[in-house]
Amino acid sequence: MEGSGIRIGRLVVRLLLEWIFLAIIGVLIYVLYISVINYLLPSSWRNTLLTYDSVVRSVIIVFIGTILVWDTGRRIGDYISKYDNVRGTVLKFILDTVVIVAVLIALAVTFEKFGLSVAAFSGTAVGIILGLAAQQTLSNVIAGIVIIITNRYKPGDRVTIVNWRYGIIRAMYPHEGLPNGFTGVIRNISLMFTEVISDGGWVYTVPNYVMLDALIIHRNMSPFKRVRARIDLPSSIDPWIFEERLKDSLRDGRIRNIKVKVGETWQSTSLYQAIIEVLADGKADGEEIKDLVLREAVKIRNELSK
């Protein structure tokens, strides 16, 4: 607890120093602007530029404020993510949205000072938003908000993303019916994109509108997993005996049930193909279970073939 308090104190001090530093920069920029107008420009330009003094101040405040909110949210979000990745991601997402709304409000107030009604500005803003709604940029933002609100997935979830936009070239070996998708762990959800770390270590950056449109298979929320493995057995091995030996050998807490079925018989009468169906716990790793089953199956095949 003491170490956590020290880290929080350092974070607060760092944020305060950044706020003071940026505030000083904002003041210096405004002083430089006034000095240039009063001492370097002709008087004919001075009066014209001074009429836009409030605009300059508003732009400086909005610019500095945006940096402050964004950087503060990023640092606090990163700190929280060390302890709760989901809440940290949601906080950063909300603060990004707040920055956009705050900038629009600041622009509306600035326009009001120059005689443009807020209603007119709001109507223009809404028109622009609706006009861009079909564009990917705003579609990503809206999709990101929907994903966060509905909690469709969150950082740390292991998922398979199935979407017609992205194709996959399958390995050329016999396999069961598999979803044509990308499997990995959700790392981050931003205003525009979702980051996924694949099982192979690749980092995928997927647009939010694609994620909203995709079929999401939640790997770590399944109540159970059904794993299938195939193995060729000599005809001399009775499938019933093979099944009983396999059940006795695979007494693993993650495995609920095992069945062995004869899938194919080849032209050669010396072999047949057995299909091993395993019902495993939902939190178990399917590939790990399959590896365990095949190792034991090969071992039992060798023993029964002697």
Image (tube, rainbow, N blue to C red):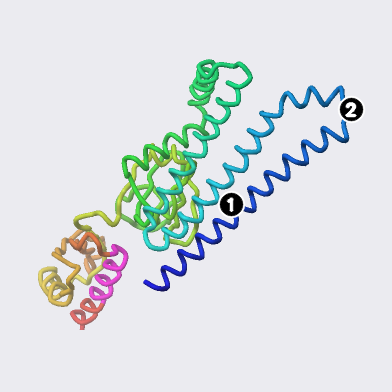
Q: Is residue 175 left or right of residue 67?
A: left
Residue 114: give its label: none
Q: Which residue occupies 86% across, 22% down?
A: 44
Q: Which residue is mark 2?
A: 42
To which residue does mark 1 refer? Answer: 19
**Callout 2 amino acid:** Pro
Measured Cα–Cα span from mark 1 to mark 2: 35 Å
Ranked by sequence position, the earlier of labels 1 and 2 is: 1
Image position of 251 (left or right of 88): left
Q: Is residue 238 left or right of residue 51?
A: left
Q: Is residue 96 magenta?
A: no
Query: Horizontal and vertical percent for residue 97?
Result: 47, 39
What predominant SS class does the magenta segment belong to? Answer: helix
Boundaries of the magenta span: 285-298
Residue at x 51%, y 65% (from the top left corner): 10
Give the percent coordinates (x, y) of residue 215.
34, 42
Identity of the amino acid at label 1? Trp
Q: Is residue 4 above or below residue 79?
A: below
Residue 64 percent coordinates (x, y):
62, 43
Q: Secondary structure at mark 2?
A: loop
Q: Quadrant of the N terminus?
A: bottom left
In the rendering, at what x and y percent does residue 69 appear? 53, 46
Residue 234 quadrant: bottom left
Is residue 296 in the magenta section?
Answer: yes
